[in-house]
Amino acid sequence: MEPVKIMLPEKELPRKWYNVLPDLPKPLDPPLHPQTREPLGPEDLEPLFPMELILQEMSPERWIDIPDEVLEIYSLWRPSPLFRARRLEEKLETPARIYYKNEGVSPPGSHKPNTAVAQAHYNKKAGVTRLATETGAGQWGSALSFACSKLGLDCTVYMVKVSYEQKPYRRTMMQVWGADVYPSPTEHTDVGKKILEGDPDCPGSLGIAISEAVWDAATHDDTKYSLGSVLNHVILHQTVIGLETRKQLEMVGDQADVVVGCVGGGSNYMGMAVPFLMDRAEGRDIRFVAAEPKACPTMTKGMFAYDYGDSAKMAPLMRMYTLGHSFVPPKIHAGGLRYHGDSPILSQLVHEGIVEPVSFTQNAVFEAAILFASTEGIIPAPETSHALKAAIDEALRCKEEGVEKTIVINFSGHGHFDMAAYEAYLAGDLPDYEMSEETIAKALKDAGVSE
Ligand SMILES: Cc1ncc(COP(=O)(O)O)c(C=O)c1O
């Protein structure tokens, strides 16, 4: 029998993360201070992050050691399996070989603990006792709650209100790991109070929840802020995904032609994709395809410009694809993809034409999810299903053109807490949202974003 699961032995767990910063085609534009709009120095970030993470954010080193304590916790689920999706290939009758890296096997169910554990470790080392964060779909909040419980830190999570209501069991999961969870916007922060005064029914957004968590960290000495995506150090920690995948493909004598993932802030996709840039630099022709919702089309319709990372303009400005920091996306079920911006690293790779963005509406995404679940068995998260839709499209193109390509997907998480979304899809109750050019132009104008 041909292998279905390609497993790396535990001793092959990467010992170093790959830092893509020195290998980018152009250096990133610096982040700017939210008040002065001057380039940020490490000391400006100190109220929010421990120094080791700040240094990683700007590091010129290509390889950074993974601390033993982090490796030890990673070993609970890493190396994660790479699957050959033979049943999906057969169903599609494609000559393409499809692989998916299953990050859904982590205790919280997604790729997010790869950075949560690392961030909790560096914070604990710096004497921090509590972390504050935001969460969209609940995956990041679960991951940080899990990491804090492993490392003995307190954890406060501002959960986007629409997800808090759609996913009560994600909230309970965080509470099982000992976290305090609030629906955002909440009355607990000045930022939240102000938003609720203007719009008592505000469904929340990642931008708003980030503002609340940043406010919490900035107003408490024992507390730092932790971000689950977007930043360079988050992408650094996520590179374990791509590093393992390269080794796993090598084990079966294959090489990636197309690397596919979904994008919220860009961390799971970059974690998978950037190690493959090393192969590209050596002359291999690899395509990079990144999928996003048409309801929040940062890469496909946003502007590549400096914008704030959060709604209340407390977080630094970064040069990225953005829809404007005040943009509140429609209530799609892929809550983790409802962010107005993107990682600066990913944004630059899109801008340079190295990463090709694609976008989908929810019904097309759920159709792909059902096809995947009925062939491969695993029920994917709605976020992950964007990547599956993009990969299925690629595989069908291979069939049309009669070419045998190797397609590698980052399967960022399972959808076991997304049954309400599946129920709505199966009942034919899912609305499709697509942002018009006018809506986006207005959102950018309202936020004062220009190139
Ligand atoms: C399962 C899953 N995939 C993907 C994402 C998107 O985040 P990122 O682009 O940072 O990987 C999320 C975010 O919550 C998620 O929960």
Image: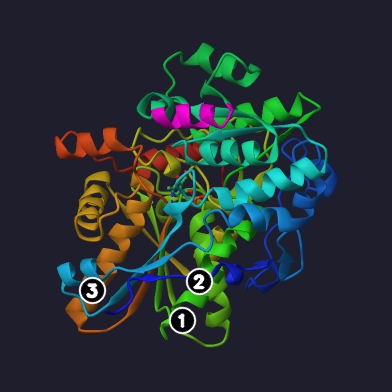
Report the side of 390 relative to 108 (left or right).
left
Q: Does the residue labelled 2 lie within 8 Å of ligand 1?
A: no
Q: 257 or 204: nearer the eye?
A: 257
Secondary element under disc 2, as helix, strand or loop, is: loop
Quarter that holds the N terminus: bottom left
Q: Return the mark for residue 8.
A: 2
Which region shows up in magenta? Answer: 169-179
Callout 2: few (<14), some (14-19), or many (20+) C-alpha neighbours within 10 Å?
some
**Residue 50 occupies quadrant:** top right
Location of mark 1 (residue): 251
Q: Distance between the residues labelled 2 and 3?
A: 31 Å
Q: Earlier in the sequence, mark 2 or mark 3?
A: 2
> What's the residue type where badge 1 is placed?
Met
29 over 431 or under it: above or below: below
Q: Residue at x 58, y 19 (%)?
A: 192
Give the image location of residue 357, x and y in percent: 40, 61
> What's the residue type where badge 2 is placed?
Leu
Callout 3: few (<14), some (14-19), or many (20+) C-alpha neighbours within 10 Å?
some
Location of mark 3 (residue): 397
Q: 209 or 158: nearer the eye?
A: 158
Q: Can residue 379 be seen in this view?
A: yes
Callout 1: few (<14), some (14-19), or many (20+) C-alpha neighbours within 10 Å?
few
CB contact under 8 Å: marks 1 and 2 = yes
State yes or no: residue 111 in magenta: no
